[in-house]
Image (tube, rainbow, N blue to C red):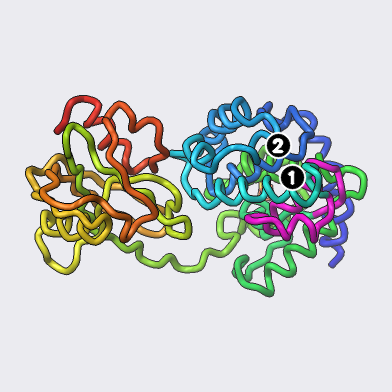
Amino acid sequence: MMREARILQELPRRLRAWYRRARRDLPWRRTRDPYRIWLAETMLQQTRVAAVVPYYERFLARFPTLAALAAAPVDEVLKLWAGLGYYARARNFHAAAQEVMARHSGRVPKRLDALLALPGVGRYTAGAIRSIGFNLPAPVLDGNVARILARLFAIHQDVKAAETQKRLWGLAEALVPPRHARDFNQAMMELGAVVCVPRSPACGECPVADLCEARRLGEQRRLPRKPKRKAVPHYDVGLGVVWRRGRVLIARRHDNALLGGLWEFPGGKREGEEPLAETVRREVKEEAGLDVAVAEHLMTYGHAYSHFRVTLHVFACRSTRGRPRPLGCAACRWVRVDELGDYAFPAGSRKIIQALREGAR
Ligand code: SF4
């Protein structure tokens, strides 16, 4: 208990002093605009800093204000997000901007309950907006902060378990200095990103190493405890590049599906041992109501999503009968290859688009 009290007392001041010296210059650290902070925090969820920077800058060049974002069609927002993954983040952020315009006169709210009522805003994002955007004494707890706390306080329980989460939120709250939440929370995030990293924490460079209980016990690499990983499922997917009169068929995914709102080449999972060409023929029929003749195999490649992996088998097809109808998708349409860039596709479709631009038929 003595040690815990010492950490709570000394850590905030020492970590802030370190942050002032060591912080990286990142685009979202040059602003206090809560809209921009919110965008950065949303993009950074599950995504590396280096990947986020160009997306963040492009996004703000097109939507410099929350009002500009709210006024744009969601397709344009998804197009700017294409390749960053977790597209529900983009749809929620756009919907939340529209709610802020409608309910809060276009000003990002400060109150926790008002923030939590917005689509896609959970306790972490609300805490980040309140502390970094408004310098209010609000805690944040994400994977990085949970890892640091588990090490500092030598917490051996599973950090994802409800009881442990409660304890971690309590510690995060107790640590936030009332007048310096902005710097302190960013300092914690920075420590987790560059020093107290998941596999090999750089304890020799850590500004609070002498406070750290895991280091004292030699357990820093073993904490936080990781629950056993489940095997990642794998699926074979057949996709059709369906041609008619020099145009290809694309389909828009339903908003509530994985990659919701994005466009793709029609196709789906192989059933049992069916031939992949049959998968494509069946899936195009189910998705777009179209009869096709599968002409030739174009390419096969792998792609990993957060919870599963796929092998994509792509076939060129000709449409033989029928008009496309959105039976298993939100919309479908014929487009020229040079128009594909006008639509938001997920990263998994890039290889196909590239091949089509290079002349594949
Ligand atoms: Fe993390 Fe090591 Fe610092 Fe402890 S001493 S907080 S394990 S970097």
Residue 336 is labelled as none
Write the start and end of the magenta stretch as one range. 110-138
Residue 180 placement: quadrant:
top right
- Asked whether, in this view, residue 163 is left or right of residue 3, the answer is left
Q: Find numbered disc 1 in the image and state the secondary structure of the residue it sits on.
A: helix
Q: Position of residue 191 (x, y in %)?
A: 68, 42
Q: Amino acid at mark 2?
A: Ala
Q: Is residue 4 above or below residue 51?
A: below
The residue pinned by badge 2 equals 67
The residue at the point 74 percent across, 49 percent down is 102
The residue pinned by badge 1 equals 101
The residue at the point 79 percent across, 55 percent down is 139
Q: Position of residue 232 (x, y in %)?
A: 35, 62
Q: Nearer the viewer, residue 78 or 21?
A: 78
- Disc with the residue nearer the chain's start (1 vs 2): 2
- Asked whether, in this view, residue 284 is left or right of residue 13, the answer is left
The residue at the point 86 percent across, 51 percent down is 137
